[in-house]
Image (cartoon, rainbow, N blue to C red):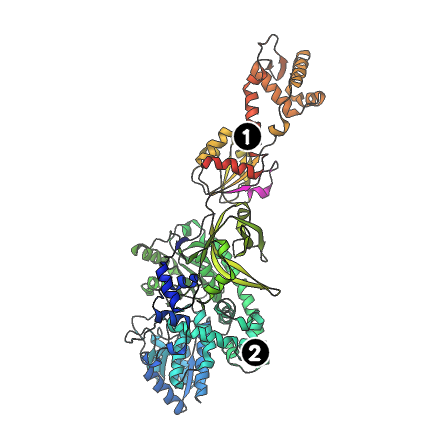
Amino acid sequence: MEAQYEWQLKATPTDQDLQAIMAVEALPKAAAQLLWQRGIKTPEAISAFMHPNVGQLHDPYALYDMQTAVDRIQAAVMGGEKITVYGDYDADGITSTALMQETLESLGADVEVYVPNRFKDGYGPNLDVYKQLVENGTQLIVTVDNGVSGLEPIAYAQEHGVDVVVTDHHELPSTLPNATAIVHPRHPEGQYPFGDLCGVGVAFKVATALLEEIPYESLDLVAIGTVCDLVSLTDENRVLVSLGLQQLQNTSRPGLVALCQSAGIEQETLDATSIGFGIGPRLNAIGRLGDANLGVNLLTTFDEEQAVEQAQFVEQQNKKRQGLVQEITALASEMAQTPENQASATLVLAHEGWHEGVLGIVASHIVEQTGKPTLVLAIDPATGQAKGSGRSVEAYHLFKALDAQRALLTHFGGHHMAVGLTMPVDQLAALQTAMNTYAADNQIDLTKKPTLAVDLELALTDVTPEVYQAISQLAPYGTDNPEPLIEMTVPSVTNVKQIGADQKHLKFTAVDQEAQLAVLAFNRGVLYDDLQAVEQLKLVGQLSENTWRGNTTLQLMLKDLQTSGQVLIDQRSNRLTQQLFKASGTYIFFNEKHLAQLQSYIPAGSQAILAADVAQQAELIVVDEPTDLDEFEAFYRQQQAAKISFIFYSKYSAYLDGIPDKKQFATFLVYLRQHPGIEKARLGELATYLKIKLPLLIFMLQVFFDLGFVKIERGLISAAEQPEKHALESAPSYQQRLAKIDMEKQLVYSTFAEMKDWLAGFNQ
């Protein structure tokens, strides 16, 4: 089994480096090593990282245009102006909207909320919506988690007497809108010390400035949006999420309490993983499938009954979202495997009828499967437009690649790893060509395996609850502070099981002497047979705890795995079934007739070749028996496969039938002398009469023919009149049978362990 990633073990500190860190904090060695690897080495940095607190938050007025934004919003509040908070439909946008709404309401503002509809309005400022807001009397628009790309709508509002305060964090276009204020952590004219705030983080800074104090009660919303938007969990984001998690574990928001209950999340132990895989996908599902205003209502309501009802609806939407993702991903995966797409460095996959709301998730799955930057779009035949999302890999800056192609796009926005776009269907091919050209011009090799930075290398016997607790001190984990990846070599695995409704996941136990560790491997169900065949395995994964019926144990969440040698699969059988021809790979035959007879059984995408022609194929399935061990050895030494499955089918077994004794040879020869001219077609009757198996009788006849004891003329068998004397063992067919028996004994009728031991001798 080959690793999906290129593993790179991070540099390890010297003992002196470790001691310096451990002198600042009473940390175990593993935790100190992780801090050193992440560049946290000075006493000040170590203390700040290990003890996040509000004193580490930056002055909100350090953000460019903050004073202007605050002055304009305060004037609107004091003047009783109608304010509209214009949000976004993802988890960051929903939490941003809820936070800004609550902040303005606490100041006594006349505030309304508008969360754009993904399908009707699209992402960011929408001109038609802005026109409607102006017409309906809005006097100030405050954007959250959007705005920097809204040149035309914002210009329209400003020209019609409606000021716009933009609060955003997305990639800055070359031309900024002419807004009243643009509060952005990476504003080209600003000098804010931390540029990785997300939308709700920026909204939180505005709220802090408006309220003239930290709104602690809003930190739960900040934690959700920050984790879900995958921004850097360093600097003040680490502070915001750390404090926000404490708030979440004790939140009294009815909507969040109900959401945790419906999702099966233990609120008291809620962490960043709970947000990323539990709360976030559910909030995102609202906007993906319908009206994201429900999400804002859920987060801000004080009605417990309404909260429970809305949380249950959100759970239903999330399940629907999961079904759509599975269905569309299956078709998109097929499209990615066409010859044209396999030859392309990037993928642009478009289809009618796809649900727009889940295409970003689908794109992420395709990137994971193929390693290629991918756009997934739904085609609207009525408008001739394709709308969807894109996801990328670290080496390929998707925003820059598409930003240079705005002439091909109707609408576009995003960042390095993710984009949203709308474009004419007839420009799809041109865009894919441009994406490929960007990769070539920037010398981006997308055929390379993505790298996987491994933090620690541990023996299985070293994985203890104490080590896990030490590592856990570095949480909360996220971008730029990832959950530590541990590499370990395990001598054997047991209890391999396929799990999940569709059996696509795996669970097994890694074993080293007395030490055992449960391993969960999502989307690796296809490795079920392979795992049962390996003896030594290298794993990379993240440690976690699993509590079942009050008992807490450690488990490894698998990220990648590999074997150091070939994977050998035992499928030896004396019966050929359709099941034996389901696997993809190269089917190997020693007998040309067998290859011709079974060609139609070879699955699509696989090939059948003779053993003498084997070369660089990765996976081999050996269908029939070789003639002898020499023929097998020639094949085995020539191949370089990572995986070989052995069927070794033969219609008749020389090993089981053995070799007739001399008495049987004599009886048969005497009969031939007494009954000259026997028809070949009657050999079956003769075998029954002589009480000798037909295959043995045919073998004996071949020996007699080799030695000149019999002759066959016009289909009639007769004994030779005065043959020369020869030992039976001197016949070529006799020697061939001995060789076949020896071959079957070694390859077919040995235990698989014995066979693998024998094969191992070729590698010594």
The residue depicted at 38 percent of the width and 81 percent of the height is 206
Q: Point out the image quarter for the C terminus.
A: top left
Q: Position of residue 485 (x, y in %)?
A: 44, 59
Give the vertical position of 385 relative to 744 (above or below): below
Mark 1 surroundings within 10 Å by alpha-carbon count, few (fewer than 14), some (14 through 19), many (20 or more): many
Q: Is residue 107 magenta?
A: no
Mark 2 — residue? 307
Q: Is residue 42 left or right of residue 571?
A: left
Q: Position of residue 562 (x, y in %)?
A: 46, 49
Q: Can residue 83 be seen by looking at this rendering? A: yes
Labels 2, 1: front one: 1
The residue depicted at 67 percent of the width and 21 percent of the height is 682
Three-letter code, disc 1: Met
Name the N-terminal-most of marks 2 and 1. Answer: 2
User: Who is closer to the viewer here, 152 or 481?
Assistant: 481
Residue furthest toward the right? 689
User: Who is closer to the viewer here, 251 or 22?
Assistant: 22
- Circle 2 SS class: helix
The residue depicted at 46 percent of the width and 83 percent of the height is 102
Q: Is residue 194 left or right of residue 549?
A: left
Residue furthest toward the bottom? 79
Q: Position of residue 479 (x, y in %)?
A: 41, 66
Mark 1 — residue? 743
- Give the magenta-colored segment's residue range: 565-581
